[in-house]
Amino acid sequence: MCMDFKFVVGQKVSYRPVGQRPALFKVIKQMPEEPGFSTDLRYRIKNDVEGFERIVNEIDLHKPAENDSNEAEWVFRRKL
């Protein structure tokens, strides 16, 4: 069963890492479907502040609101 991706490579998305505030990420790759793994599509995303990429489910990503498009206002804060 082939499903359509909601987000495209290069698109900015809002994602909230566990225990942290939502932040702006860029879609790096649409991950291939893995039979028996999940019914949700997955993406590889990256934040400009973090030094690594994340693999997340489509259901956890959101299109940033129009007023949130200024990247300077999106601050990635780690809990201490």
Image (spheres, rainbow, N blue to C red):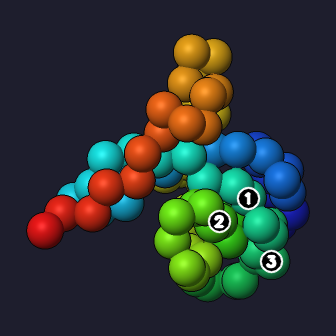
Which quarter shows the N terminus? bottom right
Q: 39 or 19: which is nearer to us? A: 19
Residue position for label 2: 45
Above or below for 67 versus 51: above
Question: Relative to residue 35, is residue 7 depicted above or below?
Answer: above
Image-quadrant location for residue 46:
bottom right
* Residue at 60% over, 37% down: 71
Q: Which residue occupies 57% across, 81% down?
A: 52
The crowding category of the residue bearing disc 2, from other C-alpha atoms within 10 Å (few below 14, some 14 to 19, many at least 20), is: many
The reply to whether residue 38 is visible in this rendering is no
- First of labels 2, 3 by sequence position: 3
Residue holding disc 1? 27
Rounded to the nearest angstrom, the CA distance separating label 1 from label 3 is 14 Å
* Residue 39 picture location, percent across and down: 61, 65
Left or right, 45 with reference to 75: right
Q: Mark 2 and mark 1: span between their CA atoms?
A: 5 Å
Q: In the rendered structure, are the residues bearing label 2 and label 1 in contact, judged by CB atoms less than 8 Å apart? A: yes
Residue extending furthest toward the left: 80
Q: Residue at x 27, y 63 (%)?
A: 78
Mark pair 2, 3: CA separation = 14 Å
Sequence-wise, the earlier of marks 1 and 3 is: 1
